[in-house]
C-alpha cells in the first residue's frame, strides 16, 4: 500500500483549487493523497473527525493548507492543536507536519506548541511536490518526551485531556491547570482509555498557580502515575494554554506548559 499524505484544507472557498493541484502533485510521486475540509466548530468538537485517519499506520505526512489569516484565527489554532496532540500521542512527537501557506507569511515560532515543529512552506513554490515526497519517505524521527498528553472530543461526553509520565518515568501525584475555561471532572485510570470509574487520592480542586504572569486554575490528585496510567480531566471552554506535571512537592517542581492558540 502506498504511503498516504493527509491534507487539511482550511478554507474550501479560497483554497480548493490549490488543494486539487496539491493532490495531483502528490499522486505524481507515487503517494496516495487524502484529506478533508476543515470544520471550524469547536462546540461540536469537529476537529476530532480526522484523527482516526491521521493515526493510521499508512499515513506518513500531515499537510495543513491555508492562509496566514486562517492560521491566525484562535478557534482554528485551537482545533488544530488538539488534533495534533492526539496524533503526536499515537505516532510520536516526530511525526511530520507541513504547513503549506496559500497567502501571507507565517513565522513558526508564533504557532501553538503542537505545531511549532512543523515545516512552513509556500504552497506556490515550484518544488513543493519534491519536498513533500522527501518528507513522506523519511523515517519518523524519535523525539523523546518526559510526558504523555492526549485529548478526546466526544459528543455527549465532552472534551477530555489525558496526561501522564512517559515510558520510564513516574509521578508521585499529578496536577493539570487551564488559563481559561473550567475543569469540572477528573479521574485516574489506565492509559489511553477514559476510565468508567476512578479512585482519587486526596483530590484537590481550584488551585491557583501563577506562572510567568499567567494564572492557571488547576486540579490535582496524589495518585502515583506510571507510564501505563493517566490523569483525565474534562475541560469546559477553550483555554489558550494548559499546565500539567507531577504534583508540586517543592517550589522547584517541574511543570509543562502547552500553548494551544
Image (spheres, rainbow, N blue to C red):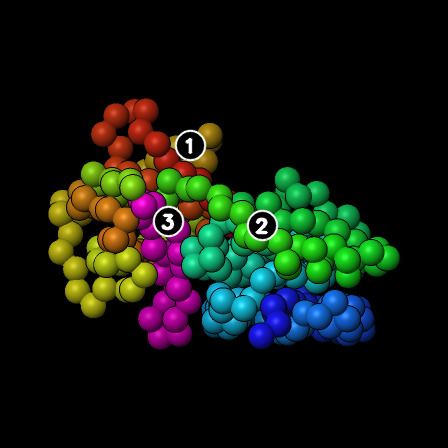
Element under label 3?
A: strand
Look at 31% across and 56% down and name the residue there. Answer: 233
Position above or below: 19 against 121 = below
Look at 35% across and 75% down and name the residue there. Answer: 156
Look at 59% across and 45% down and name the residue there. Answer: 116
Q: Identify residue for label 3.
A: 148
Marks 2 and 3, the one that precedes in the sequence: 2
Q: Quadrant of residue 20?
A: bottom right
- Magenta portion: prevailing SS class: strand
Position above or below: 104 against 10 = above
Q: Magenta span has 19?
A: no
Give the magenta part as a residue range.
Answer: 149-167
Look at 33% across and 50% down and name the residue there. Answer: 163
143 relative position to 40: left or right: left
124 relative position to 114: left or right: right
Disc 1 to disc 2, C-alpha distance: 22 Å
Disc 2 to disc 3, C-alpha distance: 16 Å
Of 10 and 170, the residue lying toward us: 170
Q: Which mark is residue 115?
A: 2
Residue 15 visible to an observer of this rendering: no
Task: Give the image location of residue 209, x and y in percent.
Answer: 35, 35
Residue 57 visible to an observer of this rendering: yes
Disc 1 to disc 3, C-alpha distance: 21 Å
Task: Give the image location of residue 54, x and y in percent.
Answer: 53, 67
Q: Quadrant of residue 197?
A: bottom left
Amino acid at each position: 500500500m502506498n504511503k498516504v499524505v493527509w491534507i487539511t484544507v482550511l478554507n474550501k472557498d479560497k483554497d480548493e483549487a490549490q488543494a486539487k493541484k496539491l493532490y495531483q502533485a502528490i499522486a505524481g510521486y507515487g503517494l496516495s493523497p487524502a484529506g478533508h475540509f476543515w470544520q471550524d466548530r469547536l462546540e461540536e468538537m469537529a476537529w476530532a473527525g480526522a484523527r482516526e485517519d491521521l493515526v493510521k499506520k499508512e499515513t506518513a505526512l500531515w499537510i495543513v493548507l491555508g492562509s496566514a489569516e486562517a492560521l491566525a484565527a484562535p478557534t482554528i489554532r485551537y482545533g488544530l492543536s488538539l488534533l495534533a496532540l492526539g496524533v503526536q500521542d499515537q505516532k510520536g512527537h516526530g511525526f511530520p507536519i507541513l504547513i503549506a501557506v496559500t497567502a501571507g507569511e507565517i513565522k513558526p515560532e508564533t504557532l501553538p506548541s503542537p505545531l511549532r515543529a512543523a515545516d512552513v512552506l509556500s504552497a506556490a513554490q515550484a518544488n513543493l511536490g519534491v519536498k513533500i515526497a522527501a518528507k513522506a519517505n523519511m523515517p519518523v524521527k524519535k523525539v523523546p518526551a518526559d510526558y504523555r498528553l492526549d485529548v478526546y472530543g466526544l459528543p455527549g461526553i465532552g472534551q477530555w485531556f489525558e496526561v501522564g509520565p512517559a515510558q520510564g518515568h513516574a509521578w508521585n501525584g499529578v496536577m493539570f491547570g487551564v488559563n481559561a475555561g473550567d475543569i469540572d471532572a477528573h479521574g485516574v485510570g489506565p492509559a489511553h482509555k477514559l476510565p468508567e470509574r476512578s479512585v482519587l487520592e486526596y483530590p484537590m480542586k481550584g488551585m491557583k498557580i501563577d506562572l510567568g504572569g499567567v494564572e492557571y486554575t488547576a486540579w490535582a490528585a496524589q495518585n502515583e502515575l506510571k507510564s501505563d496510567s493517566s490523569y483525565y480531566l474534562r475541560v469546559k471552554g477553550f483555554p489558550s494554554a494548559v499546565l500539567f506535571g507531577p504534583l508540586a512537592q517543592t517550589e522547584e517542581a517541574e511543570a509543562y506548559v502547552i500553548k494551544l492558540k
